[in-house]
Image: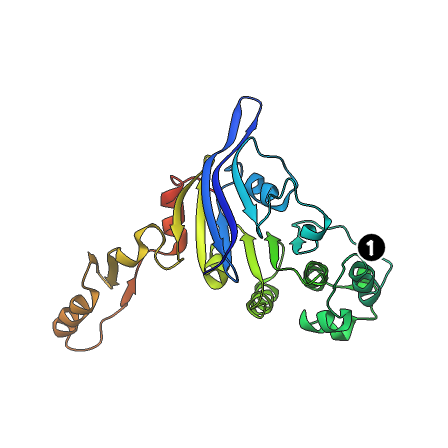
Amino acid sequence: MDTAVSVRGLVKRYGDVEAVRGIDLDIGTGEIFALLGPNGAGKSTTVEILEGHRKRDAGEVRVLGSDPHLAGRSWRARIGIVLQTAGDVEEVTVAELVRHFAGFYPDPRDPATVIEQVGLAGQARRRVSRLSGGQRRRVDVALGLIGRPELLFLDEPTTGFDPEARRQFWDLVKTLDDTTIVLTTHYLEEAEALADRVAVIADGVIVAEGEPSSLGGRARAAATVTWDGGELRTDTPTRTVAELMSRFDGEIPGLSVTRPTLEDAYLELIGGEAS
Protein backbone atom coordinates (compact mmCIF):
# COMPACT_ATOMS: atom_id res chain seq x y z
CA MET A 1 0.00 0.00 0.00
CA ASP A 2 1.30 3.45 -0.95
CA THR A 3 1.87 5.86 1.92
CA ALA A 4 0.10 9.21 2.05
CA VAL A 5 1.54 10.23 5.45
CA SER A 6 4.86 9.17 6.96
CA VAL A 7 6.06 10.44 10.36
CA ARG A 8 9.24 9.51 12.20
CA GLY A 9 10.33 10.80 15.60
CA LEU A 10 7.92 13.76 15.65
CA VAL A 11 8.52 16.15 18.56
CA LYS A 12 6.78 19.41 19.45
CA ARG A 13 7.51 21.51 22.55
CA TYR A 14 5.71 24.46 24.06
CA GLY A 15 8.27 25.98 26.40
CA ASP A 16 9.18 23.29 28.91
CA VAL A 17 6.21 21.12 27.93
CA GLU A 18 6.84 18.37 25.38
CA ALA A 19 3.38 17.99 23.82
CA VAL A 20 4.43 15.40 21.22
CA ARG A 21 7.21 13.05 22.24
CA GLY A 22 8.63 11.03 19.34
CA ILE A 23 5.63 9.85 17.32
CA ASP A 24 6.05 7.39 14.42
CA LEU A 25 3.10 7.03 12.06
CA ASP A 26 2.21 5.75 8.58
CA ILE A 27 -1.13 6.30 6.83
CA GLY A 28 -1.82 4.47 3.59
CA THR A 29 -3.23 6.05 0.46
CA GLY A 30 -7.01 5.71 0.40
CA GLU A 31 -7.18 4.78 4.07
CA ILE A 32 -9.52 6.26 6.68
CA PHE A 33 -7.31 6.73 9.73
CA ALA A 34 -8.70 7.88 13.08
CA LEU A 35 -6.55 9.63 15.66
CA LEU A 36 -7.97 9.29 19.17
CA GLY A 37 -6.91 10.70 22.51
CA PRO A 38 -8.02 12.83 25.46
CA ASN A 39 -7.82 16.61 25.35
CA GLY A 40 -4.22 17.74 25.71
CA ALA A 41 -2.79 14.40 24.56
CA GLY A 42 -1.09 15.90 21.48
CA LYS A 43 -3.42 14.79 18.68
CA SER A 44 -4.44 18.30 17.58
CA THR A 45 -0.81 19.42 17.54
CA THR A 46 0.11 16.38 15.47
CA VAL A 47 -2.64 17.04 12.93
CA GLU A 48 -1.74 20.74 12.67
CA ILE A 49 1.85 19.74 11.86
CA LEU A 50 0.60 17.34 9.17
CA GLU A 51 -1.55 20.15 7.71
CA GLY A 52 1.44 22.50 7.59
CA HIS A 53 -0.11 24.91 10.11
CA ARG A 54 2.38 24.31 12.92
CA LYS A 55 6.16 23.95 12.95
CA ARG A 56 7.70 20.86 14.55
CA ASP A 57 10.80 20.87 16.75
CA ALA A 58 12.24 17.53 15.64
CA GLY A 59 11.50 14.54 13.46
CA GLU A 60 10.72 13.81 9.82
CA VAL A 61 7.29 14.35 8.26
CA ARG A 62 6.18 13.58 4.72
CA VAL A 63 2.62 14.26 3.60
CA LEU A 64 1.85 13.39 -0.03
CA GLY A 65 5.61 13.16 -0.52
CA SER A 66 6.45 16.64 0.79
CA ASP A 67 7.48 18.29 4.05
CA PRO A 68 4.33 20.23 5.09
CA HIS A 69 6.39 23.01 6.65
CA LEU A 70 8.21 23.71 3.37
CA ALA A 71 5.50 22.82 0.85
CA GLY A 72 3.96 25.52 -1.30
CA ARG A 73 0.64 26.38 -2.90
CA SER A 74 0.53 23.41 -5.28
CA TRP A 75 0.85 21.02 -2.31
CA ARG A 76 -1.85 22.85 -0.35
CA ALA A 77 -4.21 22.48 -3.29
CA ARG A 78 -3.97 18.70 -2.79
CA ILE A 79 -5.15 18.96 0.83
CA GLY A 80 -8.71 19.39 2.13
CA ILE A 81 -9.47 20.50 5.69
CA VAL A 82 -12.80 20.41 7.51
CA LEU A 83 -12.28 22.23 10.81
CA GLN A 84 -14.27 21.62 13.99
CA THR A 85 -15.53 25.21 13.96
CA ALA A 86 -15.62 26.76 10.52
CA GLY A 87 -16.80 30.30 9.91
CA ASP A 88 -19.94 30.75 7.84
CA VAL A 89 -20.66 33.37 5.23
CA GLU A 90 -24.24 33.68 6.39
CA GLU A 91 -25.86 35.69 3.62
CA VAL A 92 -24.66 33.81 0.54
CA THR A 93 -26.28 30.69 -0.86
CA VAL A 94 -24.76 27.23 -0.74
CA ALA A 95 -24.08 27.31 -4.49
CA GLU A 96 -22.46 30.77 -4.33
CA LEU A 97 -20.18 29.74 -1.47
CA VAL A 98 -19.04 26.50 -3.07
CA ARG A 99 -18.43 28.21 -6.44
CA HIS A 100 -16.42 30.91 -4.65
CA PHE A 101 -14.15 28.34 -3.00
CA ALA A 102 -13.76 26.45 -6.27
CA GLY A 103 -11.96 29.51 -7.63
CA PHE A 104 -9.13 29.00 -5.14
CA TYR A 105 -7.97 25.72 -6.76
CA PRO A 106 -6.28 24.93 -10.07
CA ASP A 107 -8.44 21.87 -10.83
CA PRO A 108 -11.61 22.01 -8.74
CA ARG A 109 -14.47 19.59 -8.84
CA ASP A 110 -17.69 20.75 -10.43
CA PRO A 111 -19.52 22.72 -7.69
CA ALA A 112 -22.96 21.33 -8.58
CA THR A 113 -21.62 17.77 -8.45
CA VAL A 114 -20.02 18.34 -5.04
CA ILE A 115 -23.19 19.92 -3.67
CA GLU A 116 -25.14 16.88 -4.82
CA GLN A 117 -22.51 14.52 -3.41
CA VAL A 118 -22.86 15.99 0.09
CA GLY A 119 -26.65 15.77 -0.09
CA LEU A 120 -27.43 19.47 -0.50
CA ALA A 121 -28.80 19.63 -4.05
CA GLY A 122 -32.19 20.66 -2.67
CA GLN A 123 -30.60 23.49 -0.64
CA ALA A 124 -28.22 24.84 -3.30
CA ARG A 125 -30.11 28.16 -3.60
CA ARG A 126 -30.75 28.51 0.13
CA ARG A 127 -28.75 30.97 2.21
CA VAL A 128 -26.26 29.39 4.59
CA SER A 129 -27.91 31.19 7.52
CA ARG A 130 -31.13 29.22 6.91
CA LEU A 131 -29.53 25.77 7.03
CA SER A 132 -29.71 23.35 9.95
CA GLY A 133 -26.55 22.48 11.89
CA GLY A 134 -26.17 19.20 10.03
CA GLN A 135 -26.63 20.89 6.67
CA ARG A 136 -24.02 23.52 7.53
CA ARG A 137 -21.59 20.73 8.35
CA ARG A 138 -22.26 19.27 4.91
CA VAL A 139 -21.36 22.66 3.44
CA ASP A 140 -18.06 22.48 5.36
CA VAL A 141 -17.41 19.08 3.81
CA ALA A 142 -18.26 20.41 0.35
CA LEU A 143 -15.67 23.17 0.83
CA GLY A 144 -13.15 20.55 1.91
CA LEU A 145 -13.86 18.44 -1.18
CA ILE A 146 -14.17 21.13 -3.86
CA GLY A 147 -10.41 21.28 -4.53
CA ARG A 148 -10.31 17.56 -5.41
CA PRO A 149 -8.07 16.73 -2.39
CA GLU A 150 -5.98 13.62 -2.25
CA LEU A 151 -5.94 13.92 1.55
CA LEU A 152 -8.84 15.18 3.69
CA PHE A 153 -8.56 16.16 7.36
CA LEU A 154 -11.80 15.87 9.36
CA ASP A 155 -11.53 17.49 12.80
CA GLU A 156 -14.39 16.44 15.09
CA PRO A 157 -16.73 16.52 12.07
CA THR A 158 -19.98 15.54 13.82
CA THR A 159 -19.74 17.56 17.03
CA GLY A 160 -23.25 18.77 17.87
CA PHE A 161 -24.99 16.38 15.46
CA ASP A 162 -28.05 14.42 16.49
CA PRO A 163 -27.79 10.62 15.98
CA GLU A 164 -29.60 10.66 12.63
CA ALA A 165 -27.45 13.45 11.19
CA ARG A 166 -24.31 11.71 12.45
CA ARG A 167 -25.16 8.49 10.65
CA GLN A 168 -25.99 10.39 7.45
CA PHE A 169 -22.57 12.01 7.68
CA TRP A 170 -20.94 8.60 8.11
CA ASP A 171 -22.68 7.42 4.94
CA LEU A 172 -21.25 10.43 3.11
CA VAL A 173 -17.68 9.79 4.29
CA LYS A 174 -17.92 6.16 3.16
CA THR A 175 -18.53 7.32 -0.41
CA LEU A 176 -15.13 9.08 -0.60
CA ASP A 177 -13.31 6.01 -1.84
CA ASP A 178 -10.54 7.85 -3.69
CA THR A 179 -9.58 10.12 -0.79
CA THR A 180 -7.24 9.46 2.14
CA ILE A 181 -8.94 10.68 5.33
CA VAL A 182 -7.44 11.62 8.68
CA LEU A 183 -10.20 11.77 11.29
CA THR A 184 -10.03 13.12 14.82
CA THR A 185 -13.06 12.42 16.99
CA HIS A 186 -14.17 11.94 20.58
CA TYR A 187 -16.99 9.63 19.44
CA LEU A 188 -15.63 6.11 19.73
CA GLU A 189 -18.54 4.64 17.76
CA GLU A 190 -17.65 7.04 14.94
CA ALA A 191 -14.10 5.75 14.77
CA GLU A 192 -15.37 2.17 14.82
CA ALA A 193 -17.90 2.85 12.06
CA LEU A 194 -15.53 4.69 9.71
CA ALA A 195 -11.86 3.95 10.32
CA ASP A 196 -9.76 1.26 8.67
CA ARG A 197 -7.18 1.82 11.41
CA VAL A 198 -6.95 3.91 14.57
CA ALA A 199 -4.15 5.21 16.75
CA VAL A 200 -4.52 6.31 20.36
CA ILE A 201 -2.34 9.18 21.62
CA ALA A 202 -1.83 9.71 25.34
CA ASP A 203 0.66 12.10 26.93
CA GLY A 204 2.29 12.86 23.57
CA VAL A 205 2.99 9.28 22.45
CA ILE A 206 1.08 6.65 20.50
CA VAL A 207 0.10 3.94 22.97
CA ALA A 208 -1.75 1.66 20.53
CA GLU A 209 -2.42 1.37 16.81
CA GLY A 210 -4.40 -1.06 14.68
CA GLU A 211 -7.81 -1.98 13.36
CA PRO A 212 -10.70 -0.91 15.62
CA SER A 213 -11.77 -4.53 16.13
CA SER A 214 -8.37 -5.54 17.49
CA LEU A 215 -7.18 -2.40 19.28
CA GLY A 216 -5.81 -3.04 22.74
CA GLY A 217 -6.25 -6.80 22.38
CA ARG A 218 -10.04 -6.62 21.91
CA ALA A 219 -10.11 -9.60 19.53
CA ARG A 220 -8.36 -11.83 22.08
CA ALA A 221 -10.16 -10.57 25.18
CA ALA A 222 -12.41 -12.87 27.15
CA ALA A 223 -16.15 -12.61 26.63
CA THR A 224 -18.60 -11.91 29.44
CA VAL A 225 -21.63 -14.18 29.54
CA THR A 226 -24.44 -12.96 31.77
CA TRP A 227 -27.86 -14.39 32.57
CA ASP A 228 -30.47 -13.88 35.22
CA GLY A 229 -28.66 -14.70 38.42
CA GLY A 230 -25.14 -15.15 37.06
CA GLU A 231 -22.13 -13.81 35.17
CA LEU A 232 -19.01 -15.51 33.82
CA ARG A 233 -15.90 -14.34 31.92
CA THR A 234 -14.73 -16.97 29.47
CA ASP A 235 -12.57 -17.58 26.41
CA THR A 236 -15.12 -20.11 25.13
CA PRO A 237 -18.49 -18.33 25.19
CA THR A 238 -20.17 -20.74 22.76
CA ARG A 239 -19.37 -23.68 24.99
CA THR A 240 -20.55 -21.75 28.04
CA VAL A 241 -23.87 -20.94 26.38
CA ALA A 242 -24.32 -24.61 25.40
CA GLU A 243 -23.72 -25.68 28.99
CA LEU A 244 -26.22 -23.10 30.22
CA MET A 245 -28.82 -24.32 27.72
CA SER A 246 -28.63 -27.80 29.18
CA ARG A 247 -28.91 -26.38 32.68
CA PHE A 248 -32.01 -24.34 31.83
CA ASP A 249 -33.45 -26.96 29.45
CA GLY A 250 -33.70 -24.52 26.55
CA GLU A 251 -34.03 -20.73 26.70
CA ILE A 252 -31.58 -18.95 29.03
CA PRO A 253 -33.29 -16.09 30.90
CA GLY A 254 -31.59 -12.69 30.41
CA LEU A 255 -28.77 -14.10 28.25
CA SER A 256 -26.12 -11.64 27.06
CA VAL A 257 -22.70 -12.31 25.51
CA THR A 258 -20.36 -9.30 25.19
CA ARG A 259 -16.71 -8.54 24.49
CA PRO A 260 -14.86 -5.33 25.38
CA THR A 261 -15.99 -2.38 23.27
CA LEU A 262 -13.64 0.07 21.58
CA GLU A 263 -14.48 2.47 24.40
CA ASP A 264 -13.41 -0.14 26.98
CA ALA A 265 -10.10 -0.64 25.17
CA TYR A 266 -9.58 3.10 24.73
CA LEU A 267 -10.18 3.94 28.39
CA GLU A 268 -7.79 1.20 29.47
CA LEU A 269 -5.11 2.48 27.05
CA ILE A 270 -5.31 6.05 28.37
CA GLY A 271 -5.46 4.90 31.97
CA GLY A 272 -9.19 5.43 32.44
CA GLU A 273 -8.91 9.20 31.97
CA ALA A 274 -12.10 10.75 30.60
CA SER A 275 -11.56 12.33 27.17
Q: In the depicted view, which residue is nearer to us: 217 or 50? A: 50
Residue furthest to the bottom = 250
| Residue 141 falls left or right of residue 183 | right
Residue type for callout 1: Val
Q: In the depicted view, which residue is nearer to us: 96 or 177? A: 177
Residue furthest to the top = 16
Which residue is the site of mark 1? 89
| Residue 195 falls left or right of residue 123 | left
**Residue at figure coordinates x 16%, y 73% from the top left:** 245
Query: Residue 143 in the image: x percent, y percent?
Result: 72, 60
Residue furthest to the right = 91
Looking at the image, residue 29 lies above or below residue 205: below
Residue 105 visible in image: yes
Q: Residues within 10 Å of mark 1 (few under 14, many from 20)?
A: few
| Residue 191 falls left or right of residue 64 | left
Looking at the image, residue 127 lies above or below residue 39: below
